[in-house]
Structures are given as C-alpha cells and as structure tokens.
Amino acid sequence: MTLPTLLVLDADPPPRLGRLTGRVRVEHADASTLAGRLPSADVLLVWDFTSHAVRAAWPGGGPRPRWVHTASAGVDHLMCPELTASDTVVTNARGVFDRPIAEYVAALVLAMAKDLPRTLALQRERTWLHREAHRVAGTRACVVGSGPIGRAVAGTLEALGVTTALVGRTARAGSDGAPAVHGGEDLDRLLAGADWVVAAAPLTARTRGMFDARRFGLMRPSARFVNIGRGPLVDEDALAEALRQHRIAGAALDVFDSEPLTPDSPLWDVPGLIVSPHMSGDTLGWRDELADQFVELYELWAAGKPLVNVVDKQRGYVPGP
Amino acid sequence: MTLPTLLVLDADPPPRLGRLTGRVRVEHADASTLAGRLPSADVLLVWDFTSHAVRAAWPGGGPRPRWVHTASAGVDHLMCPELTASDTVVTNARGVFDRPIAEYVAALVLAMAKDLPRTLALQRERTWLHREAHRVAGTRACVVGSGPIGRAVAGTLEALGVTTALVGRTARAGSDGAPAVHGGEDLDRLLAGADWVVAAAPLTARTRGMFDARRFGLMRPSARFVNIGRGPLVDEDALAEALRQHRIAGAALDVFDSEPLTPDSPLWDVPGLIVSPHMSGDTLGWRDELADQFVELYELWAAGKPLVNVVDKQRGYVPGP
C-alpha cells in the first residue's frame, strides 16, 4: 500500500508531526521547489504562512493536491483563481488564534486608555508626570469581522465593560452563544459612535482598503483604531494622515501591507501609532497547537470523514456562526 | 443659626462643592496653616490626599473636627495616635477608585504578558522582531488585599480567564456576590503558585514591608508583581534586586516609598520594571466624583444620619465585605 504524500511548505521551526510517522510520506518544499513537487503531493501543508509561494506555483501544469491546509487564519496569501476553481479542499487554522488575539486587542485597548506608551516614555526620561487616564468600562467598540476572532475580541471587550458591536458581511440575529452581527450597511454609523474600532476581517476583494480616508473621517477625534486582521484592510497613508491631523486619537497596527515592515517605513514614527510585528495570535506553544490541529484534520481526512475549517474559496474565509 | 465650618486641606484644582453653597462656611488651609485652623473646624476635608499635614498638625492643642474625610482610599497619610484615640470619625473615598484601578492592573498584566514595553522599544529602533507572547487566560493571580479595590482587581482578572485568589487579613467564606478570601496564613503558598501577584492592601503596621526579599524569593521566576496599593508595602531594594537577579520576571509599581519619585531614583531603570506616577485610580472626572462623594456623605452628616465609609482607625481601613 502506498503511503499518501504530505508536502510541507516549510518554515523554521518545522511542524511536529510525530503522530503521523509511518502513515504519510513527508516531503518538504520551499518557494523555489514547490512548483516541482506539487504534482506528486496528496496533501499540502502551508506551514510557512507568510509565503506567497502557493499562489505563484499553483497555476502551473500537472496534478494538484486534493487538500491544502494553511497554518493561519487568513487564506489571502495562497488563493488564486486556479485554486478557487479546482476541486481541492482548503482548510485553515480557525480557532487557534481567537483567544490570544482577543487578549492582544484587550492589551492594546487598555494600554491606550491608560496612556501606557507615554508612561514608558516618561520613565525613560526619569520624569514623574501624573495624568488622568480613560476608563474602558462604559466605552463603545465596533469590531469589524464576525468570524471566531472578531467574536472572541468582542467577548473579551464586553468582559471589560465595553459595549461592543460586531459587523460582518450580512446581518444576523443573535442566538444561543452567538452574538448578533450587524451587516455592512450599519458600518459607517457604528464607526461614528465608537471609541474603539477593531479590524478583524479576512482580506477579500470586499474588505481590501475598507479603512480609508473617508472612514477614518467618520470616526470620533477621540477614537482609537486597531488592526489585527490583514494589512491591506487599511489604507496606511490615510491612517497616518488621520493620526497626524488628530482626526483620530490613536491606533495600533499588528499587520501591514508589506511585512516585515522595513526600517525605512514611515509608519514606525507616526505620532500615536503603536507598531507590532504580526504577533497578536502567537503565544508560547502556538506552533505545536497549529501542528496538532493539522494532525486532527489529517485523521478526519485519512478516515474519509468530512473536514472541518473548510474555506469557502469564493468568499475567502470559513463561513458559519 | 451658625453655619458649620468646613475646613478644606486644599490641592489644585479645588473640590467643586457648589451643592453646599450657603450651607457651610468653607475655610481653606495648606500645610502651613492647618494647625492654626483645625480648632475652629467642624469638618475637615483632606482634599490634598498626598499631604502628611494632618498627621503633623493633629496632635497640637485645641478642639478638633468631629469628622475627617479623605479623598483617597488609603488613610495611612493622615492617621496618628491622637486621631486614632479621639472621638473623631474618619471616612474615606472607598468605591471611587475600584474599577479604574482594576482596569489599570489589567492593562499592566496584559502589557507584560504581550511584551508590550519591548514592542514599543523595538518600534523606536525601527526593528521588526517577532516574539511569542504569553496567554493570560489559564494563568493564576494572587491579589493581596480583600477590600473593594482588591475585589475589583480579582473580578477583572477573572473576567480575563485568570484564576485569582484573594488574600485578606482573615479568611472568610464566599457568599452571594462576595468572593472567598484567604487568610494571611495562605499567603506564602499562594505566592509560590502565582503568575501574577498584585498588592492592593492598605498600609498598616501589619502590611508595611510585607513584600520583602523572602517573599520575592518564594515567587516563580516567571512571576510578575504589581503594586497599586501603597509604596511602603514593598521593600523597593529587595524588589530591584529580585528583578536584577531574574528571581521574578517583571514588575510594575504605581506607588512608591517616597512620591514623587525623584530623577535620581534607581528605580527608573531597573530592568523589567514599569514605573508609573501614582495614577492607577485617576480617570477623567475622578476629582468631581470625589467631590460628589464627599457631598453625599455631608448630606448624611448634616441630617444626623450614620456616615458610610467609616474607617476602623485601629486597623487603618474600612472593614467589611
């Protein structure tokens, strides 16, 4: 009996797949070898989730894996028309990042409310300067993106006393355990009333560039903006200008149009902007969680059972409550 | 009819007491004039809650106000044996600072878990360096001080998924809405198991210096310590040494032995220590809240009704659930 071939688009450190030993033939690829190895693979694990190699290699000739799993929540970096049109099933790491990202957003919101960046700057200057901070309880947030990450963010902010509205593609009523979601038609109104705006949407043709000069102009001068979704959701120049002109009070970006941000990026020193290196979901042990999640999906696949976390390739995310 | 005399130990800005206009004769004092004006005062409002002037002036001769209210949670700065032994009622600002301080502690805990100070330092250097952060959910906290502030801190940490133990002077069982409290006999054991240790106790003879070299030695190398209570709860030299020797992983102090911290203090640049200027409870509008709270107490006093927030002068705090 021939073992299935699992092709891993590698990153360092590699995934711990010991539980699959003897059950699959593991091959490895990087961006330069991926195109040549795709035709012999049954399954592709996109472990290097920062790579755009899949999108580049997939349209070439030959057979293609029947299943592609990416160790990320977003799939924008790998989707291409040929993959969308194919019969290949795409799954993602839905679930692994939800709580860590929610905590990260809470950290940013509280740090901005309590003026912590300035406290640290004053500490470097050995300067004691008392200020009055903001309360978080009683404020309002608008979380854009109603998937598991957006919902976890909303839940954590609500636990801190923040009244939070979730905005998705289409409105849906709340039900047991699932909060109500506003449709896109409510977005501008909710932005105008929010103290905190959090971008947690997948990157799709509909969401690209949605946070632009017009939308920053709708926000309150006291509003703060956080992006833990994908960089291209935001017009970075418009955000920098909104901060420089004090049209909004602050922002934090964990994701960027182009990553890693280069030393000459103007974003590093925009006033009121916190820059972090795409780490919101990455907590100690996260790589093992991602590998374990893949192994669990593999068990389903090997048993011929339906996969979970299946991406709607047209929409670009896993639909559902 | 003679109006009662309300003596205000002033700070800038002064309290807004407009609701008492025409009902009291307001006099003002500072540290240099307090002793001379105490004998003619019916009520003393310690608005400058950073001052130790009351403790200095009170033992002098002459009549004394029947009621002293301090616009602070702690009363350590004003108590002296003569005040303790007198019939004068002392009240405090219990309640005003609970939620703001709880949010501030959450901000510090999350900032340390997510390595935010280093993120901001790397941003200044225009350096992209991905790290793995800690999760807060699933960690353990020990909050020392079971009054309203400690309980609010515990409640907020619990809302973030942190299993939190409260430690007070004496153990008590939990009841409706009031969490269980450990007695001091459990403190060392709880410190040894905590990821987060929060000092939220009043400063009394029993609590002074309680966080010393021995107790920092009990904590885990990964533990982080936060003090939002009173500076002298902590042996600052022992804390600095514990941080320099990596016996604990980090700390944040909002209160100090001597405030304001002077530019030559060695604490400003202890590695892993966040220094903030006694601002944890101070949110926009807090001074008006403190003044309103005093006016409400005044209404009780003027009507001959029992006051609330009455300090047990022997213990140095308001007892009770």
Image (spheres, coloured by chain):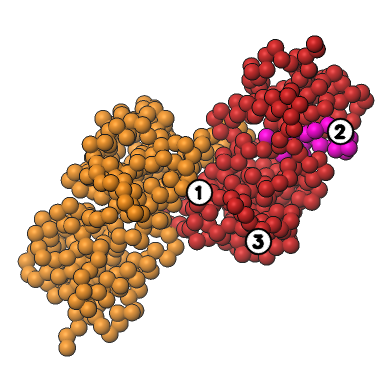
Chain colours: A orange, B red
Spatial CA distance of label 3 from label 1 is 21 Å
Toward the viewer: A265 or A278? A278
Query: B146 and A240: which one is in front?
Result: B146
Q: Nearer the viewer, mark 3 or mark 2?
A: 2
Q: Please name the residue shown 70% across and 54% down the image.
A: B168
Which amino acid is tagged 1? Ala
Read off the residue under disc 3: B191
Please tell me whether mark 2 sits on a helix, a strand or a loop: loop
Marks 3/2 in contact by CB < 8 Å: the verdict is no
**In terms of depth relative to the viewer, which is nearer, B138 or A61?**
B138
A213 versus B145 height, above or below: above
The residue at which mark 1 appears reads as B111
Q: Position of residue B118 (x, y in %)?
A: 49, 49
Q: Which mark is residue A225?
A: none
Left or right placement of residue B279 versus residue B215 in this view = left
Position of A281 with respect to A299 (left or right) is right
Question: Tag 2, which chain?
Answer: B
Q: Is residue A52 above or below residue B38?
A: below
Give the residues in magenta: B74-93
Provide the residue designation for mark 2: B87
Amino acid type of the residue tagged 2 in the rendering: Asp
The label nearer to you, 2 versus 1, is 2
Marks 2 and 1 sit apart, C-alpha to C-alpha, by 46 Å
CA separation in Å, label 3 and label 2: 39 Å
